[in-house]
Amino acid sequence: MIKNVLLDWSGTVVDDLAPVLAATNDIFAHHGKRQFTREEFRKEFSLPYEGFYSKYFPEVPLKELEGLYLEFFKKLGNDVRIIEGAREFLEFCRESGRRVFLLSTITGAHFETQAARLGIRDYFEHPYTDVVDKRGKILEILRDHTLDPSETIFVGDMQHDIDTAKHGGVMGIAVLTGYDTLEKLSLAEPPVICQSLGTLARLMGGEFGSQNSVVSSQ
């Protein structure tokens, strides 16, 4: 039985792709570089994000780029919306007694502001934010909270999330509501792919049935 749930934030619980893309494009414009379309960004962006930035800005210190991003994102934060089905999933976890943790690259201040505004902060037992490489954090989370990997899942929308789940020895579940496309996510070979967290809540009601790989739609 799944007793513990680790959740990514961006693209999994909330839809922040538009403001993140806008802030990223502001960085490119600031440095006189061509900006991304939505589909170009989804194709090129990856985690850990320093690899993405070093590809396009090898001469610019990462701290400088991070500072610009935070500056440009300030005016865009209110555009972040909860993804349909996410609240349903969080409520399902609460009602079924599952523990929920956040594992995300989002800054702590942004998470607290967004989660409070959306009314979902109290669903998370412990948020792990500002995590550049999630693979370096998941084992610490499992250890600190005495979580059995066989009873734990990590849900995310990017290849890095599935790689992180494998690194921690937990089941990785991909959702199609965020940054990586189905084609891109499939390269990471997640055992379960869902349309959204709402779909996952319904799947978990049956503990995934007898299948090892599920592509589901709402």
Image (cartoon, grey):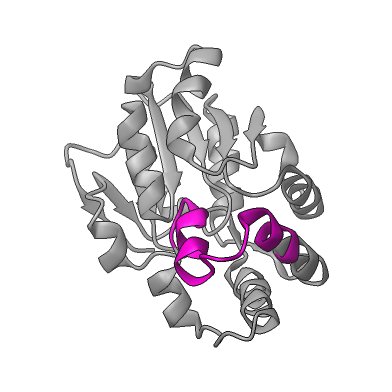
- Above or below — where is 37 with respect to 134? below
Number of residue marks? 0
Q: Which SS does the magenta portion mostly show?
A: helix
Look at the image and say whether residue 49 sits in the magenta stretch: yes
Q: Is residue 134 left or right of residue 209?
A: right
Compared across the picture, whether 190 is left or right of 131 comes to left
The residue located at (64%, 42%) in the rendering is: 130
Is 91 left or right of 169, judged from the image as shown?
right
Is residue 117 in sight in this rendering?
yes
- Determine which quarter of the picture holds residue 73: bottom right
Closest to the observer, 211 or 56 = 56
**Quadrant containing the N terminus in the rendered view:** top left
Q: Quadrant of residue 144?
A: top right
Image: 173 above or below 176? above
Which quarter of the rendering shows the C terminus? bottom left
**Can the viewer see residue 178 in this picture?**
no
Outermost top residue: 146
Q: Which residues are magenta?
A: 46-68
Question: Which residue appears at 73% of the width and 66% of the height?
Answer: 68
Residue 106 to residue 168: above or below: below
Q: Image height check: is 199 above or below 121?
A: below
The x, y position of residue 39, in whole percent, is: 43, 81
* Image spot of residue 12 (x, y percent): 51, 54
Q: Nearer the viewer, residue 217 or 83?
A: 83
| Direction from residue 118 to residue 156 in the image, left or right | left
Please check the rendered image and state whether residue 85 is part of the magenta-colored stretch, yes or no.
no
Query: What residue do we see at 64% from left, 39% from top?
Result: 129
Q: Position of residue 52 (x, y in %)?
A: 47, 63
